[in-house]
Structures are given as C-alpha cells and as structure tokens.
Amino acid sequence: LQTQYLYHSIINQTIKSLNKLNNISQIAIFDNLGIVKLRKVFANNSKQVQIDISKLNTGIYFIEVFDGKTRQRKQFIKK
C-alpha cells in the first residue's frame, strides 16, 4: 500500500496502523473468504490506531483502512 503501513505482517495480539497522509476514519478486518470479522469506526479521525485482534482465530486476514476518500487493503497473518 502506498500510504498505509503495518509494522508487521505476522501479528499475535494488536495491529498498529499508521497512515502517513490522511486521517483514518474506519478499519475493517476480513477473513480469506471476504467476511468482515471486525470493523472499527473512529469518530476523531486519527493518523495512528491500534486494534486488538486477540479474539480472531489463527489464519490469513486482510485489513482495510478507509480515510474518508480511499480504501487500502493489506494481507496479514494472525499467529
């Protein structure tokens, strides 16, 4: 992704997401079938957020960051 970065692609408990250019207004996490497993909306748009994924099962997921204009998606592995 061009503006959105995950600190690690293999994650145990918490995702730390940083969007360098725009504020984050929403984050969604999808499983490999495209089913939304977690969605978080941020009323006070933020450039850096943390999401607790400890309740997700081990597997491959996708995180989608929405800044109010564009959506960006990146794959990660929940350990």
Image: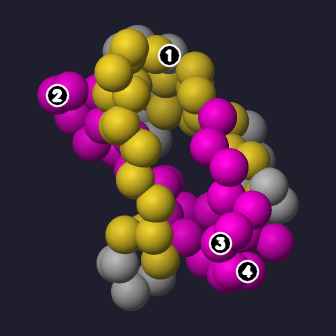
Q: Is residue 6 visible?
A: no
| Residue at 45 percent of width and 70 percent of height | 37
Q: Residues within 10 Å of mark 4 (few under 14, many from 20)?
A: few
Give the magenta-colored segment's residue range: 50-79
Task: Confirm whether the magenta stretch covers residue 69.
Answer: yes
Front: mark 2 or 3? 3
Q: Label 1, on which residue?
A: 47
Disc 2 target residue: 69
Amino acid residing under circle 4: Thr
**Percent x, y of residue 25:** 33, 28
Which residue is at 22% across, 34% downward?
A: 70
Figure check: 31 above or below 24:
below
Q: Which of marks 4 and 1 is nearer the N terminus?
A: 1
* CA distance for labels 1 and 3: 24 Å
Which residue type does callout 3 highlight?
Answer: Leu
The answer for how far apart the CA atoms under marks 1 and 2 are is 14 Å
Which residue has dot 4 on it? 58
